[in-house]
């Protein structure tokens, strides 16, 4: 499981002209990818990813979403597992199939909400337009 996490001042996801998720205050934009092997240890990875995202001290003044109540916008992103080592066309074999990935993305969102996080989302499998205003910019990769 891999997440690209950006500290933002605002962010939104639009699908077909409709905003499906938005945060209009400082928080985190999370692009979340699921690996083909993540299903085997799903429960542990889901809990760890949710904890890391919620408690990452990457907001201003080394604060986290857990300490400030800042929102997260979580967007599924299978392309995080694109392999470009050969040729010019990425291979997607490391990305989990939709029937495996969707429940795991949903489980991470649910685990964040169970921790008390305010979470907005995109729409799994849809062609999404993601807009963000990076703060810093500050972006990092979290893997579990």
Image (tube, rainbow, N blue to C red):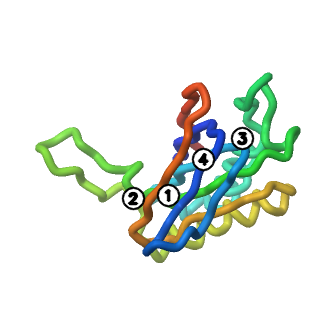
At horizontal 24% and vertical 54% (from top left) the residue drawn is 91
Q: CA distance from mark 3 to mark 1?
A: 26 Å
Mark 4 Cα shell of 10 Å, populated few (<14), some (14-19), many (≥20): many
Residue identified by numbered label 3: 26
Mark 2 Cα shell of 10 Å, populated few (<14), some (14-19), many (≥20): many
Quarter location, residue 67: top right
In the picture, the disc for residue 95 is 2
Q: CA distance from mark 4 to mark 1?
A: 16 Å
At horizontal 51% and vertical 60% (from top left) the residue drawn is 76
Residue identified by numbered label 1: 34
At horizontal 58% and vertical 28% (from top left) the residue drawn is 138
**Would you place residue 60 above or below residue 24 in this image?**
above
- N-terminal-most mark, 4 or 1: 4
- N-terminal-most mark, 2 or 4: 4
Q: Are marks 4 and 1 in contact (CB under 8 Å)?
A: no
Q: CA distance from mark 3 to mark 2?
A: 30 Å
Quadrant location, the C terminus: top right
- N-terminal-most mark, 3 or 1: 3
- N-terminal-most mark, 3 or 2: 3
Q: Is residue 118 left or right of residue 109?
A: right
Q: Is residue 15 left or right of residue 91?
A: right
The x and y percentages for residue 109 are 69, 62
Circle 3 or circle 1, nearest the eye: 3
At horizontal 78% and vertical 57% (from top left) the residue drawn is 118
Residue identified by numbered label 4: 29
Q: Is residue 91 left or right of residue 21?
A: left
Tell me the element at label 4: strand
Mark 3 Cα shell of 10 Å, populated few (<14), some (14-19), many (≥20): many
Q: CA distance from mark 4 to mark 3?
A: 10 Å
The x and y percentages for residue 128 are 44, 64
The x and y percentages for residue 16 are 43, 75
Tell me the element at label 3: loop
């Amino acid at each position: 499981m891999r997440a690209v996490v950006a500290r933002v001042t605002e962010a939104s996801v639009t699908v077909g002209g409709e905003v499906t998720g938005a945060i209009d205050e400082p928080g985190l934009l999370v692009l979340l990818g699921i690996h083909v092997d993540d299903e085997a240890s799903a429960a542990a990875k889901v809990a760890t990813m949710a904890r890391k995202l919620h408690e990452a001290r990457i907001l201003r003044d080394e604060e986290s979403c857990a300490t400030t109540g800042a929102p997260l916008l979580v967007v599924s992103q299978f392309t995080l597992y694109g392999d470009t080592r050969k040729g010019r066309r990425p291979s997607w074999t490391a990305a989990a199939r939709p029937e495996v990935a969707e429940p795991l993305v949903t489980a991470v969102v649910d685990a964040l909400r169970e921790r008390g996080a305010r979470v907005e989302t995109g729409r799994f499998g849809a062609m999404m337009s993601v807009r963000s205003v990076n703060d810093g910019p500050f972006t990092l990769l979290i893997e579990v």
